Image (cartoon, rainbow, N blue to C red):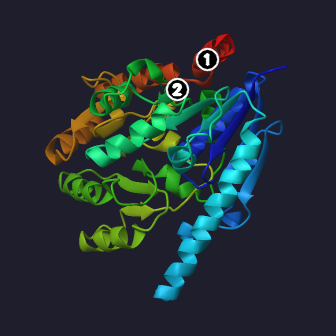
Amino acid sequence: MGVRVLLIHKWLVSGGVERILINYLSIFSLLNYKTDLLIQYNLNENNFFEEKIKNNINYDFIFKNTNPERTHKKQKINILYKVKKELKKILKEIEFNKIISNRIKDYDIVIDFNGCLDKSIRYNSKFIKNKIITLRWIHNQLDIHKNKKIKKYNNIFSKHTKVITICNEMKDRITHQLQYNKNNIHVIHNPINIEEIKEYSEQQVEDEKLIKDKYILQVSRLVEGKGHIELLEIYAKLKSLGIQHKLYFIGEGENRINLENKIRELNLVDDCILLGEISNPYPYFKNADLFVHTSESEGLPTVLLESMVLGIPVVAMNCLTGPKDILGQNSEYGKLVPLHDQDSFISAVFELLTNRDVWLHYSEKSIVRSKDFSVEKISLEIDKLFKEITQNNFNK
């Protein structure tokens, strides 16, 4: 019998973590693991990527309605409403714990892909049975500056067999700030499906004129912390230097109105295009002249790699973790710029758009670097890790 894996995730939104989730499901399928996916919340018509789940992957939802965080926002807030909401939350937690406790005993490895089990295992020392292997994936920077947070995460991580980080900087930070045993942390980079990206990049788009224009691309959810306002300011300065490229944003989020207002304020209505969510963004990656990234916080930004697969150079700000692992400490594979250094960012973009030799250099380097994150390479790392931990668990 093959390895039985249960992967638990919060929801299927249009995000980078969810793209990686789909890639891991492909890897587990490739490795012939018996894999089930358990999703905490069903977002119904707002589920993204559901059609990309492999046929041999069984999946279901715990709660057959939308996530409570995304509902009731417009309801009048009063004491009775707050009490009802809190009671409903407690009842759902009880139901969630009961369902998970019954499910996990049937698997060799349980993967908490985004912290769904944190509260359950933190307050119930018997929630995870000794013989069950559990892995806690970490995709983003953790807020571990306060003693309370340090104690919280030490408690959570100590209950898991292994903690998986997606870049070396993240592992170093957790080891240092939590004083956590580095031997219990394993680094596995986000996998990308290179052949699939290339295949999807050849598909047609609804408005062909959009990809025939000269443009710079940014892809992420339109939320605070992604540096989009700063990117608009940078772009306005690039326009003043004579750059004719448009700036496209792919993604959706609650910060859209603020971006629209900023675009009008900077008189960029004809040049900055908010394209919204696009199920297949890869033709836009392929036809861009440059990918730009100004996020203030990341785990390992997959969008950089997706651009690099197609030979499109990247200019990215160096937030605490992520971009450096991909582009190199000294900009070996793309232009890495200090966080919030607008002048350096402008210089890097301007050079790549006006110097063909530099552009070709980074285009070639991008393709080479992207292969280090291929599904095939990460599959070998995953299989090796799973064999090691299952063997160690068997020998206990």
Q: First in sequence: mark 1 or mark 2?
A: 2
Asked if residue 142 is positioned above or below residue 230 in the image, the reply reads above
Task: Please state if 215 lies on the left or on the right of 131 as rendered.
Answer: left
Residue designated by label 2: 162
Q: x and y percent of residue 353 in the render?
A: 30, 39
Q: Answer left or right for 167 relative to 131.
A: left
The reply to whether residue 293 is in sight is no
Instruction: Give the labeled residue for mark 1.
Output: 389
- Rendered residue at 76%/39% (across/down): 36
Q: Which class describes the residues within 10 Å of circle 1: few (<14), some (14-19), or many (20+)?
A: some
Please, what is the three-letter code of the amino acid marked with disc 1? Answer: Ile
| Number of residue marks | 2
Quarter of the image with the C terminus is top right
**Viewer-proximal residue among 339 and 129:** 129
Determine the secondary structure under disc 2: strand
**Quadrant of res 334:** top left
Residue positioned 49% across, 27% down in the render: 189
Residue at 42%, 55% (x, y): give it.
248
Quadrant in which residue 52 is drawn: top right
Residue in the foreground of this view, choosing between 82 and 346: 82
Residue 274, image quadrant: bottom left
User: What percent of the width, then of the height, locates residue 165?
Assistant: 45, 30
Query: Alpha-carbon neighbours of circle 2 within 10 Å: few (<14), some, or many (≥20)?
Result: some
- Residue 378 position within the rendered picture, expressed as x and y whole percent measured from the top left: 58, 21
Q: Is residue 291 left or right of residue 16?
A: left
Which of the image's four quarters has the N terminus?
top right
Real-space Cα distance between discs 1 and 2? Answer: 9 Å
Residue 330 makes an appearance in the image: yes
188 with respect to 13 (left or right): left
Mark 1 vs 2: CB contact within 8 A: yes
Q: Nearer the viewer, residue 357 or 371?
A: 371
